[in-house]
Image (cartoon, grey):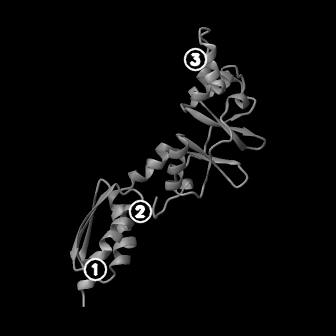
């Protein structure tokens, strides 16, 4: 995994467990348990994603089993009460599915997950056909990049770019994803730019700038 920004296709899982619209309740439960997942896409036709069924969609079946559940309580949660009586994936699934395209950046995928409160996203093509799935854990894979790889990219894409005449005087150290920049630069106004660019490198946990120099205004 080299170069940035990384996209969803770099980290997604291509082998995806899924069910059809007519999958019965118990088959869904068995599939989730067998594959140790908490949610999966629901497909129709040749593989078009039409929804997602999760453990949360199945739980009302047990929750509303209690006959003492008040009618007012059930009215407040009509959608869940309806799922309690559902027997097929088409009735249980959340639809439309929250999806992402393979060429989306990891930041875009993370933003969708945060805003839509989901833990995984089916990856689809332009017509909604399933290509893979990406999870929160997949998005964190960038933080497994070796420190040496991050250091090389910071030198190549940030230091050499911003300080072409002084790159030899700037030392880059990466420890557990934390990048420290040390050295002397001619224009300190570029330090904040450097910090921002280094933060954008995939796998960087934090940036510690220890760069000294003169301001552009003070340079004759």
Mark 2 residue crowding within 10 angstroms, few (<14) / some (14–19) / many (20+)? some
Residue pictured at 46% horizontal, 63% vertical? 4
Residue 67 lies in quadrant: top right
Please give left or right for residue 1 compared with residue 94 in the image.
Answer: left
Is 92 placed above or below 48 here?
above
Q: Real-space Cα distance between discs 2 and 1?
A: 21 Å
Which disc is residue 63 wearing? 3
Question: What residue would you read off at disc 1?
Answer: 187
Which disc is residue 57 wearing? none
Q: Secondary structure at mark 3?
A: helix
Query: Which of disc 3 and disc 2 is earlier in sequence?
Result: 3
Query: Which of disc 1 and disc 3 is earlier in sequence?
Result: 3
Is 48 placed above or below 89 here?
below
Q: CB under 8 Å between callouts 2 and 1?
A: no
Q: Real-space Cα distance between discs 3 and 1?
A: 64 Å
**Is residue 72 or residue 30 the one in the foreground?**
72
Please give left or right for residue 110 compared with residue 169 in the image.
Answer: right
Is 190 placed above or below 142 here?
below
**Quadrant occupied by the C terminus:** bottom left
- Looking at this view, name the residue that lies furthest to the top: 68
Q: From the top left corner, tell me how far across and down residue 43 is, in percent.
A: 72, 39
Total number of numbered labels?
A: 3
Please give left or right for residue 125 compared with residue 4 in the image.
Answer: right
Q: Is residue 155 visible?
A: no
Q: Secondary structure at mark 2?
A: loop
Question: What residue would you read off at disc 2?
Answer: 200
Q: Is residue 9 visible?
A: yes
Query: Which of disc 1 and disc 2 is earlier in sequence?
Result: 1
């Amino acid at each position: 995994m080299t170069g940035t920004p990384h996209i969803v296709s770099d980290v997604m899982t291509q082998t995806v467990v899924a069910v059809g619209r007519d999958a019965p309740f118990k088959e869904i439960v068995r599939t989730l348990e067998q594959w140790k997942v908490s949610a999966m896409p629901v497909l129709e036709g040749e593989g078009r994603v039409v929804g997602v069924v999760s453990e949360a969609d199945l739980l009302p079946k047990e929750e509303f089993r209690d006959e003492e559940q008040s009618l007012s309580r059930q009215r407040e949660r009509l959608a869940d009460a309806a799922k309690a009586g559902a027997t097929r994936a088409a009735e249980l699934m959340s639809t439309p599915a929250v999806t992402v395209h393979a060429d989306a950046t990891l930041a875009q995928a993370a933003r969708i997950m945060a805003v839509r409160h989901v833990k995984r996203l089916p990856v689809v093509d332009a017509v909604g056909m399933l290509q893979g799935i990406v999870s929160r854990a997949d998005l964190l894979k960038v933080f497994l990049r070796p420190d040496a790889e991050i250091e090389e990219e910071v030198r190549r894409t940030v230091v050499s770019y911003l300080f072409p005449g002084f790159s030899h005087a700037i030392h880059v150290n990466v420890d557990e994803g934390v990048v420290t920049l040390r050295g002397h630069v001619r224009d300190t106004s570029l330090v904040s730019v450097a910090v921002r660019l280094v933060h954008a490198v995939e796998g960087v946990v934090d940036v510690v700038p220890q760069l000294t120099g003169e301001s552009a205004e003070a340079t004759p």
